[in-house]
Amino acid sequence: MRRVDGLLTIAQLTWLEARRRRIVLAGLLCGLAFLLVFASSVYFAQHYGTPAGTVSLLQQQMQLQVVTLAGLYAVNFLVVALAVMLPVDSLSGEILSGVMQTIASKPIRRAEIVIGKWLVYWVIIAAYIVLLAGGLVLLMRLITGFTQQHLPVALALMWLEATVLLSVSIAGGVCFTTVTNGIIAFSFYVVAFFGGWIEQIGVMMGNASARYVGTVISLVSPTDALWRLAMHLIQPPAMAQVQVTPFSPASVPSAAMVWWAVAFVIGVLAIAVRRFQKRAL
Amino acid sequence: MMTTVIETWALRKQFGSTVAVSDLSVCIRRGEVFGFLGPNGAGKTTSVKMLLGLVEPTSGGATVLGAPVGDRSCRARMGFLPEHFRFHDSLTGREFLRIHGRLLGLHGAPLERRIDDLLARVHLLEAAHRPLRQFSKGMVQRAGLAQALIGEPELVFLDEPTSGLDPLGRVLVRELIEELRARGATVFLNSHLLGEVEATCDRVAFVKQGRTVHELSLKESTAALEVELKADRTDSSTLNGLRNFAHDVRLDGSIVRLRVKSENVVPEIARWLVGQGIGIHGLGSRRKSLEEWFIEVMGEDQRPG
């Protein structure tokens, strides 16, 4: 009971901090601004773009699918930025300023501090994904009538991708200063992004070495692999197979990558807790 | 019966090649107000952090409230005001105390009552709805004091508790320490303000280069009673005779300085000198100030920072 008590108090404190520092409000307003811009562009493309009757229904559906995927790509980038930035200062800042001293001197396990913060950010990220991606798909439907298939599984994978980055940023906050942590966590995403491209090129060119390098990078940083898997699952199989859009991956990660990512998150959090337990405050 | 609240033996902390605390050996009894004195960089704050479990000792050992240092359940019986009193400043004064109360396992109406009492005690009741970032430095420190006391601790660590306070705030801290003493709590006080330590502490330890070099009882400070004598004869036989009355006799120029156990010894010294036919030009006793002790123990090159 005491363990849950400490965890919930840290979670409550983290939520209050996020709200009072207007992090939640900023995320909400920026998300709504993004949806507004996206809706405007879709509206104008729908009403003033390709004249009616010049494309087939299939072509129109494909165009709408590509627009949705492009929108989700932007959403994914915003979610990645949130997952990195939200916790980047949380532990490192509190350790450096000394705020952590009064908290950690209470009868609370240090693991509760790490996990309590992580949980709140995890839920905020989930809400952000639902707001942005859900809002985007809803707007597409309202404006164009296009219905996106397999959305929940794609959102779950995006959430897992963000969870990986959140965990890396939390763990970095224990070991590094805020700026260093931010650089490392964001580089972690960028490296995976380019690793993904190396793997794609390897597959397309039939180069086993490039594919191998890309796969290894995906194992080290599985974020891009999760995004590619999400994009593969969300589009119609025919469209995914012909690879006519930049969002149709040539190399599709297997389902094992999901389990690897889950294990990765658990491992990174375990390291974060262990390091925090030993950390002089 | 006096019980030990803190006991350390050869406690040491090293950060890389830097030795922050080399040998901390102290024994603090229940109900004592214990002052911890030393120049900047002497390892005082690191020592407190080790006792609170915030920093893991490199070697040596300690027990706090009867449990090994860092024991989690014992931390519920402790309070701590850190030197740099930085807290979550987006919280209001009341929320801040509520969060820290809950971390101690307090809940509901008893917690709210305790918060009200403490806010009133540190004169922050009217400001309780404002976020800490709108507080003055002194107000934040008083909120920090309330935080340290919220769990009605048996042992309170106060690290420079008056650094941001005005004279009235300092009086408040002295009163709070007296209240803690009255209810039998133990106070571990780190302070550079020697006058404040002298006014509140029962006993002090001097720390130099990470080592406890001297301990002094201020309440029974017989060691601090010094007699100054100006006489017309200060030869070795006179000094030897004076040693019957004092445990330390020194000739400082033409003045003889003696450390005596009690002021009652002074008339005896006068009678003995007269009996020996030695003329007395001056004889008086005074207690050595803590500042003088500090300079003597630390050496002339060290000053309280």
Image (spheres, rainbow, N blue to C red):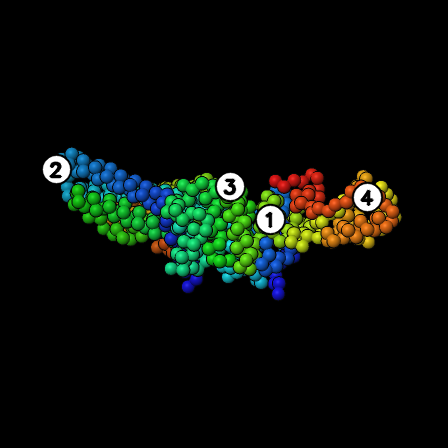
Residue A100: x percent and y percent? 48, 49
Q: On screen, B67 above or below A158?
A: below
Q: Which residue is mark 2?
A: A52
User: Which of the two discs, 3 and 4, sits closer to the camera?
Assistant: 4
Residue A254: x percent and y percent? 35, 53
- Kindly identify which chain the residue marked by label 1 belongs to: B
Q: Which residue is mark 4?
A: B280
Horizontal placement of B132 versus A35: left or right? right
Residue pictured at 69% horizontal, 50% vertical? B214
Q: Which residue is mark 1?
A: B199
Residue A244: x percent and y percent? 26, 42
Label 2 neighbour load within 10 Å: few <14, some 14-19, many 20+: few
* Type of amino acid under label 1: Ala
Q: Quadrant of the C terminus of chain B?
A: top right
Q: Which residue is mark 3?
A: B166
Residue A55: x percent and y percent? 15, 39
In the image, farthest residue toward the left:
A53
- Whether tag 3 and tag 4 are in contact, CB under 8 A, the answer is no
- Kindly identify which chain the residue marked by label 2 belongs to: A
Label 1 neighbour load within 10 Å: few <14, some 14-19, many 20+: few
* Type of amino acid under label 2: Ala
- Whether tag 4 and tag 2 are in contact, CB under 8 A, the answer is no
Q: CA distance from mark 3 to mark 4?
A: 47 Å
Res. B184 image quadrant: bottom right
Q: CA distance from mark 3 to mark 2?
A: 78 Å
Q: CA distance from mark 1 to mark 2?
A: 91 Å
Label 4 neighbour load within 10 Å: few <14, some 14-19, many 20+: some
Taking depth in this image into account, of B258 and B36 the one nearest to the observer is B258
Residue pictured at 24% horizontal, 37% vertical? A37
Q: CA distance from mark 4 to mark 2?
A: 122 Å
Horizontal placement of B257 versus A98: left or right? right
Indicate the secondary structure of the residue bearing disc 2. loop
